[in-house]
Amino acid sequence: MKKVIYISAIVLLSTFKSFSQEKSFAVKLNPLSLAFITPNLQFEKSISETSTVQLGLAFANFKVLEQKFGFVQVTPEFRKYFGEEGAMRGFYVGPYLRLISGGYTEGNSDTKIKYNTFGGGAVLGFERATQGGFVFDIFAGPNYGSTNFKQNVVEDDIPTRGTGNGFGVRFGIALGFAK
């Protein structure tokens, strides 16, 4: 088994070294999301010399004490790179949309809350891919979201349905590999 892993690692590393300087596809992971038990994968594809599209997928399903949390998040994004380096290299601006669907369950009770959020925003970022294929991406920007929620148990001070709107900040670091 160790030999298979060792040979696979050699083949994988030699493949990364053979990539050209022009990168057209990247797969990235936001390590900050792992701290919150919400893996966030990003897939970026070059569509022109200075533009890319990216699809971010995040999910969570965890329990804290007797409370269960879970959600799925989809974030499509368009990126416009500036400067002479082209797509997936240098500074960019990226407008995006975000859809989140999730829920919360409190222990063994009948209290369940489901919610859906639709929003969007824009980020400013910087991305660099090495000749070996390693990608570093850092970004930040404002966002706005509108949430609808539904609760299946009526309590004195909590409505059974509701909405919420608000502004926030999207920040992240993504590490991965490009080809």
Image: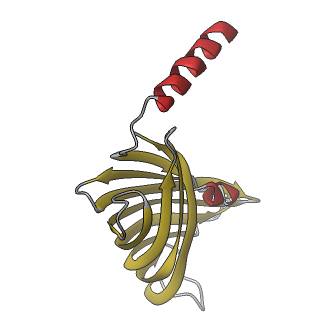
Res 7 visible: yes
Q: Quadrant of the N terminus?
A: top right
**In the image, what residue occupies the spot 58% across and 84% down?**
155
Q: Quadrant of the C terminus?
A: top left
**Residue closest to the eye, 3 or 98:** 3
**Residue closest to the eye, 134 or 82:** 82
| Up/down of 122 relative to 131, above or below | below
Image quadrant of residue 98?
A: bottom left
Q: Describe residue 3's horizontal placement relative to residue 81 as left or right.
A: right
User: Seen from this angle, which residue lies furthest right?
Assistant: 65
Q: Whole-percent x and y of residue 60?
A: 56, 55
User: Seen from this angle, which residue lies furthest left?
Assistant: 48
Res 1 visible: no
**In the image, what residue occupies the spot 45% across and 64% down?**
90
Q: Describe residue 111's horizontal placement relative to residue 121 as left or right.
A: right
User: Seen from this angle, which residue lies furthest front?
Assistant: 84
**Residue closest to the eye, 145 or 110:** 145
**In the image, what residue occupies the spot 33% across and 60% down?**
86
| Up/down of 36 relative to 6, above or below | below
Q: Whole-percent x and y of residue 13?
A: 55, 26
